[in-house]
Structure formats: structure tokens, C-alpha cells
Amino acid sequence: MNVLESPFGMRWSTFLTAVVVLLLIGVARRRPDLAVVAVVAWTGGFEVVYRFWDIVRWHEWWAWNSWFWEAAALVGWVVLAHVVGIRPSPFWLTVTLACFAIWISTGYTYNYTGQTYPFQVLPEIENVAAKTAWATAYLVGAWRVQTVPAWQRLRLDRYWRRRRPSLG
């Protein structure tokens, strides 16, 4: 059993970060719509960038075809986040870029299930730092959204339609 992997098919660090974003945005801000979009945009965007550098670093040129499909599927969530008003924090995006730059410059290694070498602490810290900084960028962006949720807009529209006097 790998201690990095949760039973949910993702690393524990990813799972716990997603739970924090879901709780803060979905429960504390009472915006589960933004919480889900922020988590999927963050994880999807991270996976596309992570896999891109993985292909480049390890010269897995055969993997470009699957990467393009994955990127095409996941970019929709990043676009949706923008449409619903989530603007990732520029500060935290800068931190994310710095973390990725450090990680890439030190070899872009990472721990994975079934690896044949011993667990490496520094690459794990680099991975978690880049991923968490990116999550924080989306968390801050989702927290700042001021729009009314769609379900409340629909309720208000129905209310005002009933209250308006007929023009005919």
C-alpha cells in the first residue's frame, strides 16, 4: 500500500486540499457551485500542466495524443471557472509558477505508486507546494466572487414575474 495514495484514486495531499476548498467555498461561503468548479478547474489545470512537463522531462513523445485529449477535456472547466467569475489570484499564480520552476529545475521527479527508488522528500515538497499554491489561487478567486448563485437568480426572477403588474 502506498501512503501517498488515498482510496479515492488521488494523492492524500490533493484530496485534503480539495476538501478544504469545498468546505471553505461550498459551506462557509454557501456556494457549492463555485466550490465544485474551482476544485475541478484547479485539479484539471494542474494535471494538464503537470502531464505536459512530465512528457517533456521523461521524453514520452508517444503520450502527446492522450495529452491533447486530456487538455481539451479539462480546459472546459478552466473556461467555466472564468465564466462564473472565478479569477485565480495573481499572487498565488506567481507562487505556483515559482514552485513549478523550482521543481522543474531540480529534475521534476516525483513519488508514485510502484516506484523502484526510495521515497524522495524534496520532490514531494515541490509537488505539494506547486499543487497547493495553484489550489490557493483558485480558492482566493472563488472566495472573491460576488455574483448571485444561479438558483437564487431563478427564484428572484419567478418572484418578480409574479409581483409585476401586467402591461397588457
Image: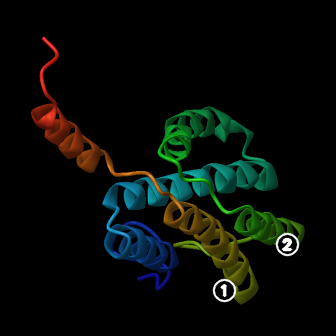
Q: Which mark is residue 4?
A: none
Q: Residue at x 54, y 53 (%)?
A: 86
Q: Residues within 10 Å of mark 1 (few under 14, many from 20)?
A: few
Q: Estimate the x, y position of residue 17 in percent, counting from the top left.
A: 49, 76
Residue pointed to by mark 2: 102
The answer to whether any part of residue 100 appears in the image is: yes
Counting every numbered tag in the picture gives 2
Which image quarter is the C terminus in?
Answer: top left
Looking at the picture, tell me which residue is in the foreground, 129 or 2: 129
Q: Quadrant of the N terminus?
A: bottom left
Query: Do the CB atoms of the residues marked 1 and 2 lie less than 8 Å apart?
Result: no
Q: Amino acid at mark 2?
A: Ile
Look at 13% across and 27% down and name the residue there.
165
Of the two numbered discs 1 and 2 on the same chain, state the one appearing first in sequence: 2
Does 153 appear above or below 104?
above
Against 90, is 24 above or below?
A: below
Between residues 104 and 23, which one lies in front from this camera angle?
23
Picture coordinates of residue 29, whole percent (x, y): 38, 70
Query: With 104 as the anchor, is 10 left or right in this view?
Result: left
Residue at image location 51% in from the left, 40% down from the top = 83
Mark closer to the observer (1, 2): 2
Q: Which residue is mark 1?
A: 118
The quadrant holding residue 141 is bottom right
Q: Residue at x 32, y 61 (%)?
A: 32
Measured from the top left, where is residue 104 in percent x and y? 83, 65
The amino acid beneath tag 1 is Pro
Mark 2: give few (<14), some (14-19) or many (20+) Cα within 10 Å.
some
Q: Residue furthest top?
A: 168
Question: Is 65 above or below relative to 51?
Answer: above
